[in-house]
Image (cartoon, rainbow, N blue to C red):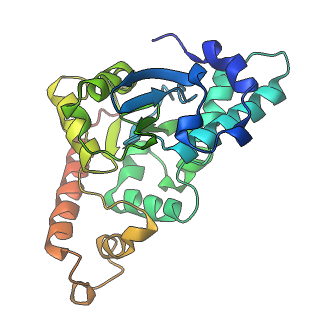
Amino acid sequence: MPALLFPRYRDAIRGLDLAQVATPAQIPAAFLLGRAGRYSSHYIPFESVHMQARLVVAGITPGFAQWKNAMREAQRQLAADGDDKDDERVLRATRLAGAFSGAIRPNFVALLDAIGVQRWLGIASCATVFGEDAGLVQVSAILRHPVFVDGKNYSGSPAPLRHPFLREMVLRWFAEEARQLPDALYIPMGASVSDTLDWLVAEGVIPAGRVLHGLPHPSGANAERVAYFLGRKERAALSSKTNGAQIDAARAQLLAQMEALLASRPTR
């Protein structure tokens, strides 16, 4: 297991004045992990890995707002610690803070339950993965530490695999995390993430058949696609922006994939 970076940054986090950090360009140099031309990567205390996780939800990279929220939570946890340096507890709390909060959470739970992920996890509903069953899920990003381009959030373009600096970040952090979770399924949040996970399958990092492609993004901006996937909206009522046939095909493929995975699962 890779050594934690957190001890190196603990004092810098304690002393960080977040009120003075209004943009990515104002992140103190102490948190800079690397830079290549227009791209920079900065430390975030997202190193905790749920070793029993059987589901990995992978985004592209934390944004600036998430960096600030994570630093604020880490400061709160460190203040509560006093002299007791329980770094793993601090890191667990920091990584869980705000994960899929707000309106996105019920959509996400409904989508996972609709394809049978709760059966893979052995629970009644994926609603509990944000509470008592949180250890079953790893909320992650293919670029663990925030990446900024010209001081703005990196959104996935150009694709990570096309840029050596970003590809190295994927291998250094996310691939090592994936190797610690050999029994997990992976849900990509976005096209760039999907392509990267497929590459990691080809590289032998993630077992074949474990990436669940095709779930609509659970954000409110994607409400119509989510509603149709869940059977809450009729195909005839869809707007011209939503491809019902494509969603039908994705749903059928995901259901078949989950049935195959469940059938091949060793009995316990």
Residue with the most extreme bottom position: 236
Image quarter of the C terminus: top left
Q: Is residue 104 visible?
A: yes
Residue 180 vertical position relative to residue 70 in the rendered view, above or below: above
Picture quarter with the N terminus: top left
Tell which of 190 and 114 is nearer to you: 190
Residue 244 is left or right of residue 29, and the answer is: left
The percent position of residue 9, horizontal first and vertical second, equals: 63, 18
Query: In front here: 242 or 161?
Result: 161
Q: Position of residue 78 (x, y in %)?
A: 76, 26
Q: Residue at x 69, y 25 (%)?
A: 13
Outermost residue toward the right? 82
Instruction: Please tell me which residue is depicted at 74% across the width and 34% down the height of the picture.
Output: 17
Residue 268, can we see it?
no
Q: Depth check: 265 or 249 in front?
A: 249
Counting labels gives 0
The structure residue drawn at horizontal position 53% and vertical position 39%, both measured from the top left corner, is 24
Image position of 57 (left or right of 263): right
- Residue at 58% over, 32% down: 27
With respect to residue 190, does 151 lie above or below? above
Image coords of residue 6 (percent x, y) = 60, 18
Quadrant of the rendered structure where residue 256 is?
Answer: bottom left
Q: Where in the figure is residue 95, as x and y percent of width and height?
A: 58, 36
**The quadrant where residue 152 appears:** top left
